[in-house]
Image (cartoon, grey):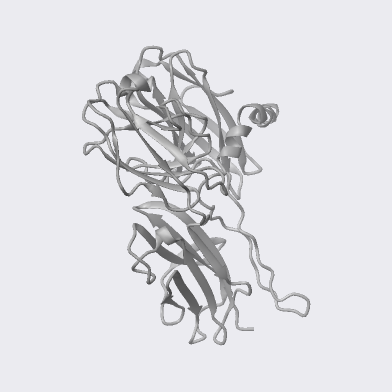
């Protein structure tokens, strides 16, 4: 018990700033209690959908410590694992092959021996601070630490995360033969979503991307960026310039989700390998703050006499031509229907008994959920709405509703 208390107090000093930063990104989709009561005092008791603070995910969460230079400080973060039931299992840690061979980055976790950490938390929550001690004074390269959660009795990991570190990035960029090029499609999609397609020069292993007029301008901790290598998104854990490794084609379709909304001042972005080879672009955010808004569903009861209608509005730069009457873009909208069964939401397919009807409009459209035959089983359901841009997930919303014939 003393060890556990020490971990949770230690988190306040080492990991709280990281935890605050991890609130950036997509809305969390979790399972919450929900029920419908029909009486004279209240027609609806609607369970909220809580945010899940876990830093590990089934899709593989990715975090970036940014660019480290010789003599730089060691790196600290906190792994947070939260479940509805007591946690019992193992956290497994592994470095990339080069780092494991060179042993120039050491992992420090209180109470851990070897590469695994035994977890037993009766309250269903683990807060585990860790430190990376770097002695890679002369090495340049991209390193990473993988973390896997294996529940007791499971043969394979169910959740994971990857932590990225770029060592001495300036040396990685040496050898570039020219400056990179920002494509004409560069620009803000909303107030906080910045699209930066660019072409890297021949030579060099990658380029630096900075916020400001020079290559030393740092992006603030908390931003999330998407690349072809990490389409699920990467959260930056500390203020840093970004290092983008060069892929086979040299073309990168970068998307950055900025921290904070409201400011519409022009932003200058600089990319390159050195003072000699760099390019800059100045872009102004749009006034639209949301990539997708969902309205309706204030009385989420569906039966043979009552349908649920949702209105979906997409930002002007993110109109999906297959869904609405707007122009073509790289955005796509999709939805998934789920039913609560034995405490877990499971995917179901719309049918004649439970229909989802889409109506197109100029800025989005409407979705109507109905049970025209009155034969769909009563219960708790939810519709998950997902929006992507060039394959990158940029928005997720959950609308919970009830089929009730009383």
Which residue is rendered at x = 42% and y = 72% of the image?
362
Q: Residue, x 30% and y 47% (percent of image)?
A: 184
x and y, in percent, of residue 4 in the image: 66, 31
Instruction: Name which quarter of the figure residue 180 lies in.
Output: top left
Q: Position of residue 236 (x, y in %)?
A: 48, 35
Q: Is residue 280 above or below residue 74?
A: below
Q: Vertically, is 27 above or below 214?
A: below
- Which residue does the image show at 64% across and 84% down from the upper left? 406
**Residue 156 shows up from this direction:** no
Q: Nearer the viewer, residue 194 or 394?
A: 194
Q: Is residue 299 visible?
A: yes
Residue furthest to the right: 41
Q: Position of residue 191 (x, y in %)?
A: 50, 51
* Residue closest to the eye, 20 or 36: 20
Q: Is the N terminus in the top left, top right, bottom left or bottom right quadrant?
A: top right
Q: Position of residue 276 (x, y in %)?
A: 31, 23
Number of numbered discs overlaid on the protein picture: 0
Query: In front: 79, or 252?
Result: 252
- Whether residue 102 sits left or right of residue 353 in the image: it is left
Quarter occupied by residue 360: bottom left
């Amino acid at each position: 018990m003393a060890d556990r208390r020490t971990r949770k107090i230690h988190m306040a000093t080492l990991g709280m700033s990281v935890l605050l930063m991890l609130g950036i990104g997509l809305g969390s989709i979790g399972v919450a209690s929900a029920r419908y009561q029909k009486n004279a005092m209240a027609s609806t008791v609607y369970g909220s959908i809580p945010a899940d603070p876990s830093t590990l995910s089934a899709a593989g969460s990715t975090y970036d410590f940014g660019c480290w230079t010789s003599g730089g400080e060691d790196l600290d973060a906190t792994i947070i694992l939260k479940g509805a039931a007591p946690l019992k299992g193992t956290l497994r840690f592994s470095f990339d092959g080069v780092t494991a061979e060179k042993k120039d980055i050491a992992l420090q976790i209180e109470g851990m021996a070897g590469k695994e950490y035994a977890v037993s938390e009766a309250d269903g929550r683990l807060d585990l601070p860790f430190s990376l001690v770097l002695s890679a004074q002369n090495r340049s390269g991209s390193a990473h630490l993988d973390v896997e959660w294996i529940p007791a009795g499971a043969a394979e990991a169910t959740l994971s995360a990857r932590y990225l570190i770029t060592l001495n990035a300036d040396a990685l960029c040496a050898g570039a033969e020219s400056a990179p090029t920002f494509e004409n499609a560069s620009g803000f999609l909303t107030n906080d979503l910045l699209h930066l397609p660019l072409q890297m020069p021949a030579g060099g292993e990658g380029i630096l991307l900075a916020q400001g007029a020079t290559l030393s301008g740092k992006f603030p901790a908390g931003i999330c960026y998407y690349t072809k290598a990490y389409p699920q998104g990467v959260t930056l854990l500390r203020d840093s310039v970004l290092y983008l490794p060069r892929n086979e084609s040299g073309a990168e379709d970068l998307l950055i989700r900025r921290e904070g909304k409201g400011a519409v001042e022009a932003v200058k972005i600089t990319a390159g390998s050195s003072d000699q080879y760099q390019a800059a672009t100045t872009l102004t955010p749009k006034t639209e703050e949301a990539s997708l808004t969902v309205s309706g569903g204030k009385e989420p009861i569906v039966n043979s006499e009552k349908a649920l209608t949702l209105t979906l509005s997409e930002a002007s730069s993110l109109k999906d031509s297959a869904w609405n009457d707007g122009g073509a873009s790289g955005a796509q909208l999709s939805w998934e229907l789920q039913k609560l069964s034995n405490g877990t939401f499971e995917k179901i397919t719309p049918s004649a008994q439970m229909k989802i009807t889409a109506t197109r409009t100029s800025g989005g459209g409407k979705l109507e959920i109905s049970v025209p035959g009155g034969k769909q089983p009563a219960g708790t359901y939810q519709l998950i709405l997902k929006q992507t841009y060039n394959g990158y997930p940029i928005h997720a919303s959950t609308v919970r509703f009830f089929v009730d014939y009383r």
